[in-house]
Image (cartoon, helix red, strand yellow):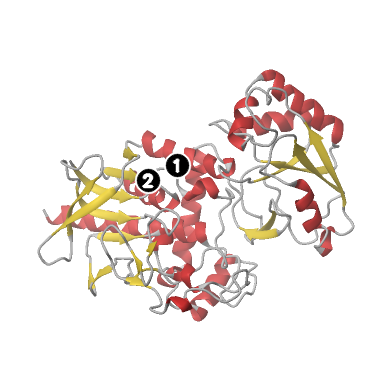
Amino acid sequence: MKYDVAVIGGGIAGYCSALKCLESGLKTVLINQGHSSLHFSSGSIDVLGNLPNGLEVTDPFEGIAALKKLSPKHPYSKLSVSEVKRAMLWFQTLLNQAGISLSSSKNGHNHHRITPLGTLKPTWLSQPFIHQLLPHSSLKRLVLVSIDGFRDFQPQLTLDNLNQIEEFNKVEKKILSVRIPGFDSLRQNPNELRSIDIARILKQPKAFSSLVHQLSAGATVDDLVILPAIMGNGDGLTLMERLQSETQLRFHEVPTMPPSLLGVRLEEALQGMFTKMGGVQLKGDKVISAHWHEDKKAIRSIQTANLEEFPLIAKHYVLASGSYFSHGLVAESSRVVEPIFDLDVHYHKDRRQWRVKDFFSQSSHPFMQFGVVTDDHFNPTLNGQTVRNLHCCGSVLSHYDPIQQGCGGGVAIATAFHVASNIVHAITSEEALV
């Protein structure tokens, strides 16, 4: 089976690189092992929240210039600020076309969102029902919704932590308990329902109407209603729009324990666009080996677990396999490896240096910055030699901490956009010479 591009990984970086290639008419296959880390995602897109020295960033694009001085090997340091902006605008437009309207603050700065733990996190793009907290914004009252039998959102913990934040000290807060009919038939103990279970129940008119009635009775139009993300299964935003219309309330959705329906919405949108644009997806499959050209500087073909006897041949390959969670990186007792191609990986040889002593420290843990070594074009190396037709993007890359720096989504999108653009240029140039 022959393709122009074979993409390994079904997270945000994998889909973005594949969609960018499809836009240019390239025959593209994506190998997707299973659910991506989007199922653990907030559903917002962070470009840059903090510099490596811990300083919070107001304008993420201005912050990238400062970041380059502090961290010259960071993935952003290999990109121009204008290219990062183009990538983010492209992604925002793409998701709008897929039915998810992502927005930033009017001045282009980061805004804060309230997290399920009751903290504030800077981000750049958010979904329609994420309340964007801006400087000097005022709230009269917060109403935190507690759903009977739902264990993945603890409103009392959220409330207690919000009380520790100065700007929320004088804001009135209330926990509103709701009970949705239909739960009892699904559970065997009082606390086993997950967000996806509630989403299925709320498709029933009786359950949805009950939620509308209880919210309308317990909150007012002046409140900000903090609701765990419980609308999903393909029509989450449609149901949220209906909920807002029928209650006239102002909502702020917070992600819950996996599956995060806010993240699942993004995944469903990206998958839908990929299929609509004619991409070939090998879902539930994984790459198990590669065949190399003799000089080991280019890949000839790859084999997957489900199609072992039928190699996939492509002109270019994209490695967007993620980090430790998705097994794009594997930490062994004394080293960190990239398991598919055995690419060169940046890591500390002394395992004692993999983390800081205080595990819950605000500082970045060194292991978070381990990853594949690449050149300035995101081509990786194998035994010191650059692999010409393999391109890396997303969290498999080294020299950045997506959590501490608040840049995971931005790096994934921007590096995917960059490598796909390079591939399109390379194939176009090759065809022009024929």
Looking at the image, which residue is at 57% across and 63% down?
406
Front residue of 65 and 206: 206
Q: What amino acid is labelled 2 in the image? A: Leu
Looking at the image, which residue is at 42% across and 53% down?
326
Q: Residues within 10 Å of mark 1 (few under 14, many from 20)?
A: many
Q: CA distance from mark 1 to mark 2?
A: 8 Å
Q: Kindly identify which residue carries mark 2.
A: 19
Front residue of 101 and 213: 213
Residue 34's place in the image compared with 217, above or below, is below
Whole-percent x and y of residue 51? 58, 73
Whole-percent x and y of residue 97? 49, 39
Q: Quadrant of residue 429?
A: bottom left
Can residue 8 be seen here?
A: yes
Residue 320's place in the image compared with 273, above or below, is below
Quadrant, the N terminus: top left
Looking at the image, which residue is at 50% across and 48% down?
38
Residue 369's place in the image compared with 148, above or below, is below
Q: Residues within 10 Å of mark 2 (few under 14, many from 20)?
A: many
Residue 251's place in the image compared with 40, above or below, is above
234 left or right of 344 in image: right
Q: Quadrant of residue 395?
A: bottom left
Looking at this rendering, what residue extends furthest in the front direction?
A: 189
Sequence-wise, which precedes: disc 1 or disc 2? 2
Q: What amino acid is labelled 1 in the image? A: Leu
Q: Kindly identify which residue carries mark 1.
A: 270
Q: Please tell me whether mark 1 sits on a helix, a strand or a loop.
A: helix
Can residue 25 be seen here?
A: no
Whether label 1 touches label 2, CB < 8 Å: yes
Q: Please tell me whether mark 2 sits on a helix, a strand or a loop.
A: helix
Whole-percent x and y of residue 369? 46, 70
Whole-percent x and y of residue 131? 71, 48
Give me the disc on residue 371.
none
